[in-house]
């Protein structure tokens, strides 16, 4: 069984039904688990309900959505206070001011924006694990979402730096919480079309890069469910001895040197070429 029946997960980072958090949360529920979603603020909960025409009123009523700004330790503490026993946690959260931290030039004097991006996108994983771990009495699984940080992509700038920090935080937390039987891993996803992705300047460039480097076909508008499938594996009992790892769900782009040659590209791309 991919997930134990009735297992409970907190899934943080819901913005709309395009969010990776929503893809993971709805798969957990289809697999028999229970999900407590978090949005950044009470206002965003209202926005989520107002802007999700694809959900029925019944589906909306069934969702357990709470709010938590991960830069506020008081809100993180309040979220987990009395939450009951958990089997795991998904951290699907990142932010960097696109005007200063992303774009054509890596250099910026906006140090407060850099610090804010670091706090939200990397440090907050440690904050939420600190408060969530006592509720994983029988151990649990924590999952973060990252993007290939070994290479310097254009425009991604300080978010690339933050993803490297997030991955280092995954390893440090895996070391710290092995004694609690809490595992900590990340899925490194190829580009998928979400609100956060669309705020990356020239996001389409990343999609084109994947067409030239991914041995498997990669469709930025359609691969969220594949990211969720890998997430379910890492959250559930089948990955019991895996911790501190970064699992690439990227069509294989991360192992390719240079670009694929035309005869190596997948069928769909050959048709497009
Ligand atoms: N979309 C991609 O191409 C892609 C690829 C690899 C990794 N990721 C990662 O996946 C994760 C989810 O992003 P997404 O693409 O689903 O976009 P998204 O915009 O749907 O989700 C990002 C979430 O972060 C939340 N957030 C920002 N600041 C916060 C704060 N202070 N407190 C609480 N929440 C806050 C936003 O409200 C939003 O819900 C991020 O870590 C992102 O970097 C995305």
Image (spheres, rainbow, N blue to C red):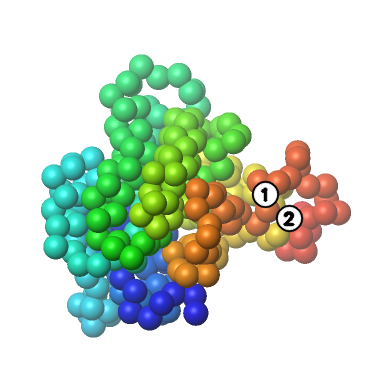
Q: Seen in the image, is 58 located left or right of residue 97?
A: left
Residue where numbered disc 2 is placed: 215
| Residue drawn where x is 45% and y is 19% of the image | 107
Q: Quadrant of the C terminus?
A: bottom right
Q: Residue at x 20, y 77 (%)?
A: 61
Instruction: First in sequence, mark 1 or 2: give its number.
Output: 2
Residue at x 40% of width, y 58% of height: 181
Say what secondary structure mark 1 lies in.
helix
CA separation in Å, label 1 and label 2: 7 Å
Instruction: Indicate the quadrant where residue 47 lies.
Output: bottom left
Task: Confirm or reject: label 1 Cβ below 8 Å from ligand 1.
Answer: no
Q: Are marks 1 and 2 in contact (CB under 8 Å)?
A: yes
Q: Pointer 2: residues within 10 angstroms few (<14), some, or many (20+)? A: many
Answer above or below: position of 209 versus 49.
above
| Mark 2 Cβ and ligand 1 under 8 Å apart | no
Assign a secondary structure to mark 2.
loop
Task: Evaluate whether residue 273 shows in this view.
Answer: yes
The residue most toward the front is 179
- Who is closer to the viewer here, 80 or 260? 80
Tell me if I can see residue 196 in this picture. Answer: no
Q: Residues within 10 Å of mark 1 (few under 14, many from 20)?
A: many
Residue 97, position in %: x, y?
34, 34
Q: Give residue 259's position: percent from left, percent from top.
A: 76, 42
Which residue is drawn at the image coordinates 45% and 68% (left, top)?
236
In the image, residue 1 sits, relative to residue 109, either above or below, namely: below
Depth check: 12 or 6 in front?
6
Image quadrant where residue 209 sits: top right
Residue 152 drawn above or below residue 18: above
Give the residue furthest to the right: 263
Counting from the top left corner in percent of width and height, residue 83 is at 18, 64
User: Viewer-proximal residue, 44 or 50?
Assistant: 44
Residue topped by disc 1: 253
């Amino acid at each position: 069984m991919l997930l134990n029946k009735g297992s409970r997960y907190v899934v943080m980072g819901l913005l709309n039904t395009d969010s990776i958090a929503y893809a993971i949360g709805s798969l957990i529920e289809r697999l028999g688990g229970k999900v407590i979603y978090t949005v950044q603020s009470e206002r965003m909960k209202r926005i989520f309900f107002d802007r999700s025409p694809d959900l029925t009123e019944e589906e909306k009523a069934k969702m357990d959505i709470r709010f938590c700004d991960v830069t506020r330790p008081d809100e993180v503490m309040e979220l987990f206070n009395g939450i009951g026993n958990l089997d795991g946690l998904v951290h699907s959260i990142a932010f960097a001011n696109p005007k200063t931290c992303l774009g054509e030039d890596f250099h910026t004097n906006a140090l407060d924006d850099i610090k804010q991006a670091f706090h939200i996108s990397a440090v907050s994983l440690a904050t939420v694990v600190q408060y969530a771990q006592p509720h994983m009495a029988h151990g649990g699984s924590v999952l973060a979402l990252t993007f290939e940080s070994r290479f310097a992509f254009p425009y991604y700038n300080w978010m690339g730096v933050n993803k490297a920090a997030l991955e280092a935080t995954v390893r440090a937390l895996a070391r710290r919480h092995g004694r609690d039987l809490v595992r900590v891993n990340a899925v490194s996803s190829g580009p998928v079309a979400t609100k956060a992705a669309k705020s990356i300047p020239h996001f389409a460039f990343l999609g084109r890069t994947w067409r030239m480097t991914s041995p498997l076909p990669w469709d930025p508008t359609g691969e969220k469910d594949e990211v969720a499938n890998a997430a379910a594996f890492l959250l559930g009992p089948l990955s019991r001895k895996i911790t501190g790892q970064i699992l690439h769900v990227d069509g294989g782009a991360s192992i390719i040197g240079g670009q694929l040659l035309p005869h190596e590209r997948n069928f769909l791309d050959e048709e497009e070429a």
